[in-house]
Amino acid sequence: MLLNCDLGESFGAWQMGLDSHAMQVIDLANIACGFHAGDPDVMAQTLKLAKQHNVQIGAHPSYPDKQGFGRRSMKLSHDELVNCLHYQIAALDGMAQVHGLSISYVKPHGALYNDMMADKGVLETVMQAVSSYAKPLKLMLLATNEQPSHLAMAEKYNLPLLFEAFADRLYTNEGRLTPRTEPNAVHDKPALMAQVEQLLTQGTVTTGSGSTLALKADTLCVHGDNEASIALVKEIKQLIEK
């Protein structure tokens, strides 16, 4: 299973995450496109790191909400959202080409990611935007029990999908992430490692109610926020490579 991580989320003098450390152990780098975080210098630095470590790169676009770090929902028209996504994807794609790289997928960020998983209209608009970009790209989204309908929707646009799972989050019976406001929504280390092993060996997770849920995931989302996170990613990588 491939490891993906949100990177390039620093801005100016404000530093976020240990990108240089995370890039050494991940497979897919979701790089911020400037609307929730990132700037031209940060993009360039992150792309250089990806090239150095032979990591696949994807665009990580969001609603235009830098002050809220892209975590606030916005009501955009169909055309506004399509144009917003094309603008951000093109920015990273252009920067990548300067460095001899090519983006291969898109993973929406924050509230946009949550909205597309909760609202089929938003999801279809995102799919239309990604599929109509100037070159073929994949779309990364959450692996849930709605996977068949997501695949059917994507097929209309000839859009390949990458399904992701989360190592550190408690799942609902529907395959969604338990809101962080609820108890035990974020796993401690033993529960996290147990969930990763269960995903790898059985293709399932145990939900908050104790049910077993099958998840077909191509990639696992991890974090590179601090030294403890990096150490954890390294342990997950070792588990995958056993």
Image (cartoon, grey):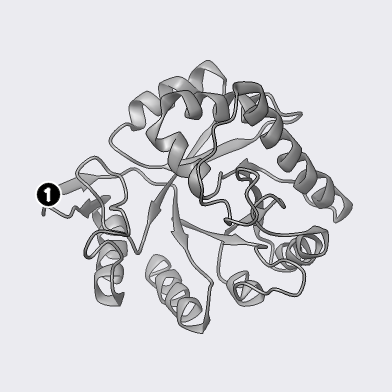
**Residue toward you, 31 or 110:** 110
Q: Residue furthest right?
A: 98
Q: Residue furthest top?
A: 156
Q: Say which element carries label 1.
A: loop
Query: Which residue sits at x=23%, y=53%?
Result: 205
State the residue position of label 1: 211
Residue 62 pos. (x, y %) = 60, 45
Query: Which residue sits at x=85%, y=56%?
Result: 99
Amino acid bearing label 1:
Ser
Q: Is residue 184 left or right of residue 169?
A: left
The quarter of the displayed image where residue 90 is located: top right
**Residue toward you, 2 or 144:** 144
Q: Where is the N terminus found, in terms of image quarters?
A: bottom left
**Residue toward you, 145 or 84:** 84
Q: Is residue 94 left or right of residue 4?
A: right
Q: Is residue 131 above or below residue 102?
A: above
Query: Which residue sits at x=82%, y=58%?
Result: 40
Residue 200 pos. (x, y %) = 32, 58
